[in-house]
Image: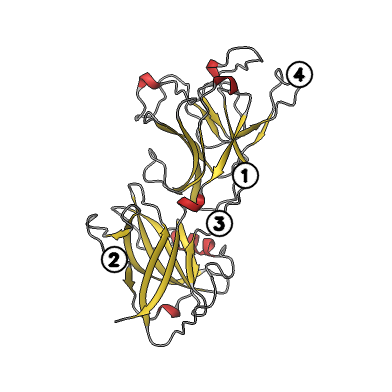
């Protein structure tokens, strides 16, 4: 019941005409019960999740009143094919069939569902692609939030150890933390009073279904989370690797607290030197998250890590928007049964 209510709330956020791309001249004569999915961008999921497709009847406020699942499936982004939920080697094709006429429904959506065991047959609130259904318009499913190409920045610095290095002092100890902040250092003189501001400018997420999460991935293989967060304007939900010193009131993490490293990080690699060959990025994570050790494929912004320790805690670095390569974009056709 709760999942259905949550899904109703999420659907109310759908903009009028979402997925409309012009008149394609199709008239809903007869029974159109075949759904053909043609992804142009569709990530392979991490473990613990599977895609599920739905057609939905809604009310005037886009609340879900009635729905029908048209299939669960995996997607192989390398071979560009849909795979069976019971046999990951079986190509199941891109055509799915429903009972009744697709034009009796108002929306089509794809959600992320728990795998291999989904205790609830209802759709989850974790909607990854969505479109209205209109016989006068072509159908394109996309994520129901846009991510503008605004400036997003991060800084390298170890804040929780209580030390701030002034100009000319060694900054070697500052290489163990990543914070999504804009270093302003507007004090006088600039190197003695440290100030900073919000570094990430991402849109507000739906109330349920997703959280943002920061990640550091080193070329040597070490990948660690900086913490999940709902708003980039506030501190995140996990600072378990920090010491007891004051930290910025924004998302980020120091990877320095003794014996706090994740299970996948060797003790010899801790504290974690983030000024190494690798990348820092923000993902869109399903909530709840069935695999907290690995990032989702839905990467929003990303940047290479700096390797020059002189720039630690003195400079903020730009992050680039990468959603055109990571978020779903799926063309949909509706056909009559053969």
- 1 or 3: tag closer to the N-terminus: 3
Mark 4 and mark 2 residues within 8 Å of each other at the beta carbon? no
- 4 or 2: tag closer to the N-terminus: 2
Q: CA distance from mark 4 to mark 3?
A: 42 Å
- 2 or 3: tag closer to the N-terminus: 2
Q: CA distance from mark 2 to mark 3?
A: 28 Å
- 1 or 4: tag closer to the N-terminus: 4
Residue 201 tag number: 1
181 sits to left or right of 289? right
Residue beneath disc 2 = 93
> Which residue is found at the position 46% from the left and 82% from the top?
26
Residue 52 tag number: none
Q: Judge depth for marks 2 and 1 and give the one in front.
A: 2
- 4 or 3: tag closer to the N-terminus: 3
Residue 123 shows up from this direction: no
**SS at mark 4 in the image:** loop
Q: Judge depth for marks 2 and 3 and give the one in front.
A: 2
> Which residue is found at the position 52% from the left and 26% from the top?
177
Residue 189 tag number: 4
Q: CA distance from mark 4 to mark 2?
A: 65 Å
Give the position of the N terminus as an image quadrant.
Answer: bottom left
Residue 31 shows up from this direction: yes
Mark 1 and mark 3 residues within 8 Å of each other at the beta carbon? no
Residue 214 place in picture, x, y as percent = 50, 38
């Amino acid at each position: 019941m709760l999942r259905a209510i949550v899904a109703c709330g999420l659907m109310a956020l759908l903009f009028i005409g979402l997925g409309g791309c012009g008149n394609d001249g199709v008239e809903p004569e007869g029974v159109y019960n075949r759904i053909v999915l043609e992804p142009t961008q569709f990530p392979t999921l991490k473990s613990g999740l599977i895609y599920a497709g739905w057609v939905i009847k809604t009310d005037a406020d886009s609340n879900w009143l009635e729905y029908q699942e048209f299939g669960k499936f995996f997607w192989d982004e390398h071979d560009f094919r849909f795979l069976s939920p019971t046999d990951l080697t079986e190509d199941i094709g891109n055509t799915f069939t429903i009972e009744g006429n697709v034009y009796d429904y108002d929306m089509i959506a794809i959600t992320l569902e728990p795998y291999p065991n989904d205790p609830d047959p209802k759709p989850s609130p974790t909607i990854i692609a969505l479109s209205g259904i209109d016989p006068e318009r072509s159908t394109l499913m996309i994520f129901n939030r846009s991510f503008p190409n605004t400036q997003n920045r991060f800084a390298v610095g170890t804040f929780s150890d209580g030390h701030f290095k002034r100009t000319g002092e060694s900054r070697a100890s500052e290489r163990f933390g990543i914070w999504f902040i804009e270093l302003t250092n507007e004090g006088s003189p600039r190197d003695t009073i440290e100030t900073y501001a919000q570094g990430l400018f991402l849109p507000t997420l739906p109330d349920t279904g997703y959280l943002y999460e920061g990640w550091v991935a080193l070329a040597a293989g070490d990948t660690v989370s900086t913490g999940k967060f709902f708003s980039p304007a506030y501190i995140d939900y996990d600072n378990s690797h920090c010491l007891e010193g004051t930290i910025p009131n924004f998302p980020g993490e120091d990877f320095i607290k003794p014996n706090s490293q994740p299970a996948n990080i060797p003790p010899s690699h801790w504290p974690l030197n983030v000024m190494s060959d690798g990348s820092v990025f923000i993902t869109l994570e399903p909530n709840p998250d069935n695999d907290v050790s690995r990032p989702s494929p839905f990467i929003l912004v990303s940047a290479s890590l700096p390797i020059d320790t002189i720039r630690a805690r003195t400079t903020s670095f730009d992050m680039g928007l990468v959603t055109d390569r990571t978020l779903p974009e799926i063309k949909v056709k509706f056909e009559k049964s053969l």
